[in-house]
Image: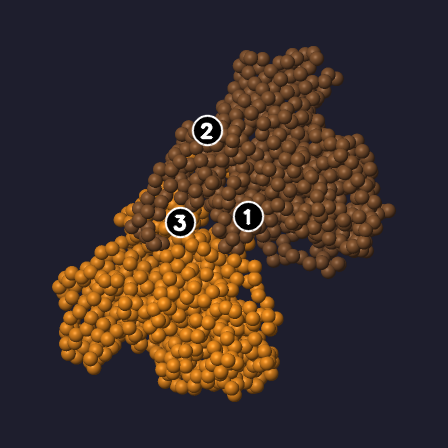
Chain colours: A orange, B brown
Amino acid sequence: MAGCGEILYGARIADGFWSAFRDTVVREGIPYQWRALNDAIDDAEPSYCMRNFRVAAGKEPGGFGGCVFQDSDVAKWLEGVAYSLRWHPDPELEAVADGAIQTVIEAQQPDGYMDTYYIINGLDRRWTNLKDNHELYVAGHMIEAAVAYYRATGKRPLLDAVTRLVDHIDSAIGPDAGKLRGYPGHPVIEMALMRLYGITGDEKHLRLAEYFVRQRGQSPLYFEEEDARNKNEFYWKNSPFRYQYYQAGRPFLAQKDAEGHAVRAMYLYSGAADVARATGDAALAEACRQLWRSTVRRRMYVTGAIGSSEHGESFTFDYDLPNDTVYGETCAAIGLVFFARRMLALEAKGEYADVMERALYNGVISGMQLDGKRFFYVNPLEVVPLACEKDHNKRHVKPQRQKWFGCACCPPNIIRLLASLEDYIYSQDGDSVYAHLYVGGSVDFEIAGARVGLKVDTNYPWDGEIAVTVDARRPVSFTLNLRVPGWCRSYALRVDGAAVEASPVDGYIAVRREWKPGEKVVLRLDMPVALARANPHVREDAGKRAVTRGPLVYCLEAADNGPDLHMAMLHGAKPEDFEVVWRPDKLGGIVELRCEGLRETDAGWNDALYSADAAVQTQRAALTFIPYYSWANRELGEMRVWVRE
Amino acid sequence: MAGCGEILYGARIADGFWSAFRDTVVREGIPYQWRALNDAIDDAEPSYCMRNFRVAAGKEPGGFGGCVFQDSDVAKWLEGVAYSLRWHPDPELEAVADGAIQTVIEAQQPDGYMDTYYIINGLDRRWTNLKDNHELYVAGHMIEAAVAYYRATGKRPLLDAVTRLVDHIDSAIGPDAGKLRGYPGHPVIEMALMRLYGITGDEKHLRLAEYFVRQRGQSPLYFEEEDARNKNEFYWKNSPFRYQYYQAGRPFLAQKDAEGHAVRAMYLYSGAADVARATGDAALAEACRQLWRSTVRRRMYVTGAIGSSEHGESFTFDYDLPNDTVYGETCAAIGLVFFARRMLALEAKGEYADVMERALYNGVISGMQLDGKRFFYVNPLEVVPLACEKDHNKRHVKPQRQKWFGCACCPPNIIRLLASLEDYIYSQDGDSVYAHLYVGGSVDFEIAGARVGLKVDTNYPWDGEIAVTVDARRPVSFTLNLRVPGWCRSYALRVDGAAVEASPVDGYIAVRREWKPGEKVVLRLDMPVALARANPHVREDAGKRAVTRGPLVYCLEAADNGPDLHMAMLHGAKPEDFEVVWRPDKLGGIVELRCEGLRETDAGWNDALYSADAAVQTQRAALTFIPYYSWANRELGEMRVWVRE
């Protein structure tokens, strides 16, 4: 089946929901992170990021500081900056970024190698621990930064630098005799090379990406050989996932379940989907589908969070989705967005966009405080603050967002995704244009030589009416594919004021016609409250419901409902019993959902712990639900997504 | 209020329920453990236990092997043997034990010191790490063994040896100038010294026990000083409980909640209760009551298991009782039995006996396979075997009992408790005799110079009828206190065939009369099925019930009910809807409980993970419950105590 075509770069976002998030990115995130990269945050450990590059370039004395993958923070920052410059030009920021790029390039070695950890600590040890030492991961992020910066500014220095880096990698690693038959312990370079290939068209870039996808897990196992040769440690030796932590327990085509480190999984799957699309390899595409199904049909939280276990930040097993000990790393939900977007490119099916939307509106943006200043690494679906303190199994779960992290992967990742959100909304395949997400703004494209624009007005996700106005100089024929989200049970379509009957195929309504300038399509997605159940195999959600409305998953928070949220029950409240209230003053503006439920009380229990005589005592209780992403923006307290029926 | 008096030693057990457990102790447990102590188990790591004593005695070359507290396994074995010799005389076994004692004594140092770890590794380091190196713990167990062996056989060598050991300890540790103001990191010596005091009447033994109870947690903190002085590690530095792991975070009288390592807590509380009783110190008794309430009213599982977290084998916080990640160490439930028995001695209240019974019939004996050959360290209330394998948070939970453990504390502990079960049944306070537990057998005591016997016939816990026959030469007046368990809602008492109206006071019916020889009391405790709820503050049990009958907690097991036990629901089944079936052929003979409930099915879900449309599909399902203690005696599979309503 056909994919959804190419990303329509250059879309503009002017949206009641997303613009606020994106404003915090340019106002708070990018400047704060630049200070972090330069060790200029007073109450935080130094990151050593920019200093490492200066030391590696011989411009400053000192040793290497930070994690082995510390360079990637610089790359992710540059990538985020690049995206932001597209919609928020800032010559001052661009000059800073140019300077940073200059420093990065100065650290590059004559042979093209770039990784300050090894440049500073000794190049003789480079490529001796692909499994754990992240050289190819850092390279991948630097390539992504270079591509983004080139696309945004047209400036080539970093692009040229990473092209030389890729040449160097290609000379050292690969299937040919005399090269290391290795691959990255942490994928990302696969996606990055495919982005680079999208610009260079250089088959070498495609070939290397494909090699990385196909070689991992092949026997004899490179990581085993590498460990033996270089006396490396194998930290996960006694874990249930072992080499699958690195997505290298078996060849890609033999992987049936989403296993191991969730971020690595998503990044690899994303790269593989890119390669499958570029090569047209059906077996690879089918392997991607298989891993997609495993991920989203058996191992994903209702918020789009993935990674059930803190141990190895990993998947566990089918339907094992504990809400309180979940890992649900922000980066993993972001990775799921990457994967979904690429599956959509492989085949235009609404299921992919549904998951992309689910993760975006819930498990991704829950990672950032509304003011853009604090971040979650772990995104739980159920929190009791005292348990985070007293129960070792929940020590990774923080009841409030943190300022920054020693391993600061999530904040820059969320920044670069939000800054490039427009790339996830539209795509074009010939004379077919797709709207995958509904975000206020506009996009331009070309149909048969004519420049066409679409202007989108919507209050999504707070209501489901989306008005799309065609902007063109003359009538032009094309198909406008409007997604009907999987959560939507009824909708109405009006074209130029007239009701049109249309049924979605694979999740999209295709409106094909000759569009006149100014013509307007209005899609009204009915957006009632819905009470989700989890598949009965999910032990932790048995007898519980998740309150949702449109793409948003809701939760109970103590600030509205008091503590002991496990005592709250919907008590048969039906979707239509909920009050839907727009609260412009609350949490940056939210639709709040209210219903009358029940609350168990401890009346009559006194000091007893078990009793066969005690009846369940309940009282009527007003329950107030807020969007999950907005939790933990008020005082410390409990939170719960899955509520007893 | 008055206690329940002194233990009536010498009771005899001939019981349909307990005799089988005790037979496995002499048939399997004691011989197997002796082989383990002597490294004669083919497929197990050597224990080094007896070898360490021979090496320490200079009779064999070699180093120290095993854990730092390895000697305690020998002590616990000797204690178990001693108890068994009281009711299962075995001259051959006694000779073996005499030989082992001889070896132990040969290792004792001229100054009385006994601990093979330091004797072998260097006496200059002794008493440098009371916090972690268990010298006083080992001493405590050796004292317990010596007292038991002396009581059982009248033989003094080990008793004399430990008396010299205590003299040595008293010379090195204590409040006086020049002594270390230390105390054990792992309590047990407190209880042990009180037992020794019960034989010797030597005030020094009481004083030392009292010192250990009162000194811990006093400022300046001995363990901090000791760590600094001897450069010891503090492993729990960053844990939530820190020094409370060792029960030394604050002075005993200032401890309000059951915290830290659950076994250490129970052993300390038990010793403190002994001291409170012996000294009559009201503040100490009140502190024991406070810790009792914290333990059993807010931090105990329905099975009598304690210790919610594997991390530090510890308590967590009030009402935090996860069923699947629970620790619930067998030793901790045994410790709870010790504590309960001592609180009962402090004050004759049924609440203590209720908890003692709850732990004994459930969380203690669940630790041993029915054939006595395998043991649980951890006693979960909910098990999914795949989760034990794939979820790191449940890696300590084993779905099947293990043969032995590297740290083999639980198997010998359960053996010594079962071998001495008769000491927990009866007590006497002047002319008042108590029956705390109902176990078939007999006991003798003296009232006003007359020898009186009680013979108990019962099929408890399978039914609630208990017949007590008085055996005396002439009429004799005394009060027979019969416990009415907390679980019992109705009962009937007949004395000499005539119905007698009686109300329990503090859990005991006091029948005072002049008893004629052969007179019989029949107490019929009605024993219907009961469906327990947990206090509404217990998050993990919300909306669930535990099926119980009499003292037994029941569970669902996959062998009877198939997998996915979280899909099973009682669906409003009432106690009277249950079928109560005696199954002599099953699991050593059990009363099985059956009801018709519901089972959720995944019909209609296909491959979906979340759905707002799917109705809960159920089908009627026969649910079969077995006593919790008997789980995991068949094929590998799920188990669950708390079942959805």
Query: Residue A622 placed where, x, y %?
Result: 35, 46
| Mark 1 nearby-residue class (10 Å; few <14, some 14–19, many ≥20) | many
Q: Amino acid at mark 3?
A: His
Q: Secondary structure at mark 2?
A: strand
Occupied quadrant, residue A436: bottom left
Which chain is indicated by disc 3? Answer: A
The alpha-carbon separation of the residues under discs 3 and 1 comes to 22 Å
Which mark is first along the chain, 2 or 1?
Answer: 1
Q: Amino acid at mark 2?
A: Val
Query: Residue A209 placed where, x, y %?
Result: 42, 75
Number of the label disc, if any, that sits on residue B83: none
The alpha-carbon separation of the residues under discs 1 and 2 comes to 30 Å
Which chain is indicated by disc 1? Answer: B
Question: Residue furthest toward the right?
Answer: B110
Say if residue B282 shows up in the picture.
no
- Judging by the rendered image, the residue that carries numbered circle 2 is B580
- Judging by the rendered image, the residue that carries numbered circle 1 is B398
Q: Amino acid at mark 1?
A: Lys
Is B469 rendered above or below residue A295? above
Is B624 rendered above or below residue B180? above
The alpha-carbon separation of the residues under discs 2 and 3 comes to 30 Å
Say if residue A234 shows up in the picture.
yes
Residue sitting at 48 percent across and 78 percent down? A174
Tag 1 and tag 2 share a subunit: yes
Q: Secondary structure at mark 1?
A: loop
- Judging by the rendered image, the residue that carries numbered circle 3 is A537
Residue sitting at 58 percent across and 81 percent down? A123
Asked whether A215 or A191 is in front, the reply is A215
